[in-house]
Image (cartoon, rainbow, N blue to C red):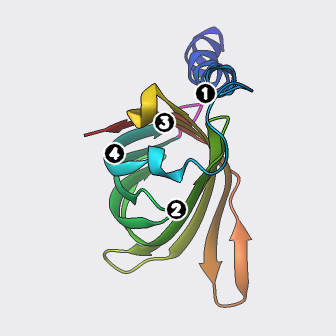
Amino acid sequence: MKMLVRFALPTTLVALVAIAAATLAFGAAGPKGNEDSLLNGSYSFRLDAADDSLAYDGYLEFDGNGSLVAGHFSVNRNGSVSHERVDSGTYTVSSDGTGTLRIVTVPTSGGLYFVFEFDIAVAHKGDVAYALETLASQITPIGLENLTEAVSGELMQQ
């Protein structure tokens, strides 16, 4: 248990500290209004669960105007790997550098469709963003089924 806490805490703390730092960096004297243009271009990412049961690795392509234009990533859930392609996505970045990201995926080889939502904090003029998953759902014939998973990590501009 001590090892789990030792690795789980740094990942979560990094995400929370990044959100706080972005808030301070873009505070009252910072830019005003919509800052979606801070995320523009290709970003690689790795997001992990605190208990190491889940990891996402891949890339996302942001258009600088609040939409995802491409993306692909692998998901490892307890050793079972699936590959997801971004079907659509939206994001917002507010004047304090914090925002949201919503991704709808299409499975690349059968399987299920997913919806992922994240709180994000953009830092270093858009070179880095930190993400904390707030919702993961699979799309079923009867609607959305929420999954009990949470990941956090870093997106780095390429």
Q: Residues within 10 Å of mark 1 (few under 14, many from 20)?
A: many
Which disc, if any, is residue 100?
none
Q: Residue furthest left?
A: 158
Q: Is residue 58 left or right of residue 6?
A: left
* Residue 71 among those drawn in magenta: no
Q: Left or right: where does residue 28 sit relative to residue 21? A: right
Q: Position of residue 124 (x, y in %)?
A: 44, 26
The label nearer to you, 3 versus 1, is 3
Q: Quadrant of residue 72?
A: bottom left
**Mark sitting earlier along the chain (3/4):** 4
Mark 3–mark 4 CB contact (< 8 Å): yes
Earlier-in-chain disc, 3 versus 1: 1
In the picture, the disc for residue 43 is 4
- Residue at the image point whose x is 42% and y is 56% from the top: 64
Secondary structure under the numbered disc 1 in the rendered image:
helix
* For residue 148, above or below residue 87: above
Above or below, 2 relative to 86: above
Q: Nearer the viewer, residue 81 or 125?
A: 125
Mark 3 lies on residue: 129
At label 2, which amino acid type do we have?
Gly
Most prominent secondary structure in the magenta stretch?
A: loop
Which mark is first along the chain, 3 or 2? 2
For numbered disc 3, what is the local secondary structure? Answer: strand
The CA span between labels 2 and 1 is 21 Å
Q: Which mark is residue 66?
A: 2
Residue shown at the point (59%, 60%) measured from the top left: 116
